[in-house]
Amino acid sequence: MPTENFRGRYIPTWRPMPLRDKVEARFARGSKALAEPKGNEYTISAIKADTGSYTGHVMPHPKMLETAEGFLERAIEDGILIDGVVSRAGDDVHLLMTHNYGTGAKEIHGLAWAIFLETTGIAKAMHLYGAGQDILKSEFSGNVQGMGPGVAEMEIKERATEPIIFFGADKTSPFAWNRPLYEMFADHTSTIGLVVDDKMEGGFLFEVKELKENRNALFLSPKDNNELLAYVGSQANAIERIWRARDKMICAVTSTSRLSYIANKYVGKDDPVMWVRVQSGLPAVGEALNPFAFPSLVPGGMRGSCWRPLMPCSEFDCDPTYNDGPPRVIALGFQMCNGRFSEPTDHLGDISFDNARRKCLEIADYMQRHGAFEPGRLPDEDLEYGGIPKIRERVKNRFVSLDGFKHSCKQSELFDTLEEKLKE
Ligand code: F6R
Ligand code: MG
Ligand code: MG
């Protein structure tokens, strides 16, 4: 629902709410009844897209978010969804949904696609910025993977008590999750539970994707930690899923789509999302949040072309306004109940992340001051705008090999050769 920023600034922002409660309250006043959710096995899906925002690439308009809520409410009424929540980070709309259709289901992906077309329509009508930015294909193919929106979904058997955290980031790529996930599930300096909790014995299986090649491999932590680090330390690869090794329970899933690989050109940031199950033989809530107290550098800042620190923040405070950033991450905690979402806890808004935010802003200043020099700017192959390749193409013939020139040759001869090229 639309709300005011908690600091009392009179600007619109957004409060994510579980929608089944709302539908039930409406039904209680009428004659219809909502069917009870069946059992404790269901799919939890996060599907996200940037379909337009204001001002510039900052925030989806509340009308778009309210419209998305309306769609999810109707899907709950029709028994398609168990529950739903609409959230956002920066200019991205997140649809959080529970249902019984499994992963990659056309009923759920079709619903998300219909919502994103509708929010695109609103954005277009209001002349919002980047309307339909992540809608890269015109025909729905039954699954939104590869069509622009990002997807993180997993089939779970709800535990007797099921705490789970949804993370959403803006102005960055799936690489943003690699270090935090490694620290949560493989590094005792962040998760001491890996050593002291015997329920974590046996470690975790990391499923890693080579993003360009679209190939996945498994690594068993702690045995394969070095091999794992060799891959997940690079932005060419992303952790896609994590399983607890001893019982193969799925613990985490991320969205790994790279929009530039889909569209073959810069079309916007990937702005990934992920789910992480926590507690009882998994990282504690605090261990899952801990890695975000270190604002490490991630790709995707200003124009998708810069390294910038990832700033933990509240859902109420995730407008990327300073140098189009810094890249933001929000974390909403839910205590599930037969597939129903609780009201979310807004974890990274907590004051204990104030130091990280301060440090982050200093790092952002420092990185920004590099301007177009690396490592402020990303390496050439990762730049998301076409300006530099065009410059290179334009001036490539200016370069001549000076190998043929003798050390003793006249400086003027050398200069003349280079100047001739400048005139071409
Ligand atoms: C958008 C982003 C921004 C834009 C920048 C320029 O996700 O990261 O930094 O790249 O605002 O946007 P355009 O090219 O649309 O004017
Ligand atoms: Mg945008
Ligand atoms: Mg975005």
Image (tube, rainbow, N blue to C red):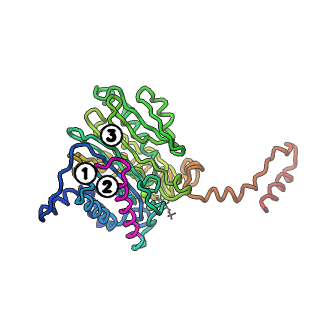
- Please name the residue shown 39% across and 58% down the image: 92
Occupied quadrant, residue 84: bottom left
Label ID, residue 344: 1
Confirm or deny contact between disc 1 and disc 2 (CB under 8 A): yes
Q: Secondary structure at mark 1?
A: loop
Residue 327, can we see it? no
Residue 154 appears in the picture as rendered: yes
Amino acid identity at mark 1: Pro
Answer whether residue 107 is magenta in the image.
Answer: yes
Q: How many marks?
A: 3
Instruction: Determine the main secondary structure of the stretch shown in magenta.
Output: helix
**Residue displayed at 52% across by 54% down:** 260
Q: Is residue 93 above or below residue 221?
A: below
Cα–Cα span, label 1 and label 2: 10 Å
Residue 419 coordinates in the image, percent (x, y): 80, 58
Please check the rendered image and state whether residue 122 is part of the magenta-colored stretch, yes or no: yes
